[in-house]
Image: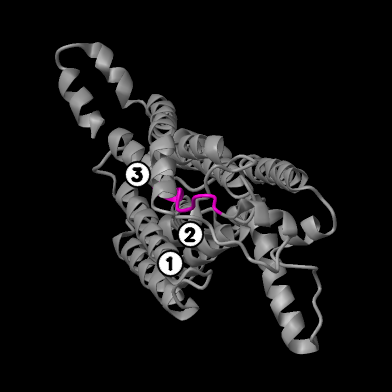
Amino acid sequence: MLLYLFEYLEQYNSVFNVFGYLTLRSILGVLTALVICFVTGPIMIRRLSDYSVKQNIRSDGPQTHLLKAGTPTMGGAFLLLSILVSTLLWGDLENRYIWVVCFVTFAFGAIGAFDDIKKLIQGGSAGISARLKYALQSAVALVAAWWLFQTAVVPVETNLYVPFFKNIVIDLGAWFIVLTYFVIVGSSNAVNLTDGLDGLAIMPTAMVAGALGIFAYVSGHSAFAEYLAIPFIPLAGELIVFCAAIVGAGLGFLWFNAYPAQVFMGDVGALSLGAALGVVAVLVRQEIVLVIMGGVFVVETLSVMIQVASYKLTGKRVFKMAPLHHHFELRGWPEPRVIVRFWIITVILVLIGLATLKIR
């Protein structure tokens, strides 16, 4: 939005030309989202407390979590607001990729908000039915996937690229819709499952978003893309503004969500953030790299699947509790240790993901 203002002012003073650069707008996107979080965070937390929008704690979980009872939840609302406002302020609104990432992020946030509100009304942790939640997620993901497939201009937009191998390219055709659907829905639920400790999900999300922003920037720059032997996607560069907004909002939210948390993000934040990572990975054609960089999310999800399958088939549990972070807590790890170690693992995985830019 502000890009149009600066383009208009440029005819009177050439200094405003600097706002046309993606790098500057990305930095401003980080700062804007950060400031919005800092300003709206305390107000939102007070309002959530006043209206008793508080987290329900499972009695069968780690006993230390009982102390978290009464902590405000649905803080992801101001996190989501920060991301969308910052993106719309500094992004190029003529770029169709900006609109699709905003649509997916907002829609999944709305689904999460619906679930959070239902939990509060019912006074438990059930929320909306799993079938309804999955149906709503599927509808949004399929709409986005179909639209991206129909509006694809160049073949690279629907091809699958395998990291570390520059010559392995798979023409997906209509299977692009299927892959996109699973990436968006899968990443959304993976982040949601990981969001079980103070700051555990938000920091890896910010790190992965920052790395995807780098992929977006180089993919949208013909010279960089050619040098790195990655697909050149003309519109992808603008996505760095969106990714930067996630980083800024993530850091701003962490200010209030760090242990011991003053607020939890709830499904409204977790589902939207996961979907945002998924759709950006699809747009920059780095779905497999997302699996690498988001390894913590993947392992957390697999731990739940393994636990459920094992219990149904054998009547025994593989882990003390799933998702995996609760398993380590029940083994005696203090919560901050689990959080920081998962952060460190994410740093390593993100660096491996970034290495795919050069190692081919």
Q: Which residues are magenta?
A: 70-77
Q: Earlier in the sequence, mark 1 or mark 2?
A: 1
Image location of residue 7, percent across then percent down: 20, 25
Q: Using the image, tell me which numbered label, if any, was put on residue 267.
A: 2
Q: From the image, which quarter does the N terminus lie in?
A: top left
**Amino acid type shown at disc 1:** Asp
Instruction: Report whether residue 65 is seen.
Output: yes
Image location of residue 297, percent across then percent down: 63, 57
The residue at the point 65 percent across, 43 percent down is 350
**Amino acid type shown at disc 3:** Leu
Q: Earlier in the sequence, mark 3 or mark 1?
A: 3
Q: CA distance from mark 2 to mark 3?
A: 17 Å
The residue at the point 67 percent across, 67 percent down is 59
Q: Main secondary structure of the magenta part?
A: loop
Image location of residue 288, percent across then percent down: 60, 58
Instruction: Report whether residue 270 is seen.
Output: no
Give the residue number, with chain letter if any, for mark 3: 84
Secondary element under disc 1, as helix, strand or loop, is helix
Residue 13: quadrant of the picture: top left
User: Mark 2 packing: few (<14 Cα in 10 Å), some, or many (20+)?
Assistant: many
Q: Nearer the viewer, mark 2 or mark 3?
A: 2
Image location of residue 27, percent across then percent down: 43, 27
- Specify how the rendered protein is coloured: one colour
Left or right of residue 196, residue 42 in this image: left
Q: Mark 3 near mark 1, Cβ–Cβ under 8 Å?
A: no
Residue 79: quadrant of the picture: top left
Q: CA distance from mark 3 to mark 1?
A: 21 Å
Q: Residue 71 in magenta? A: yes
User: Mark 1 packing: few (<14 Cα in 10 Å), some, or many (20+)?
Assistant: many
Secondary element under disc 2, as helix, strand or loop, is helix
Secondary element under disc 3, as helix, strand or loop, is helix
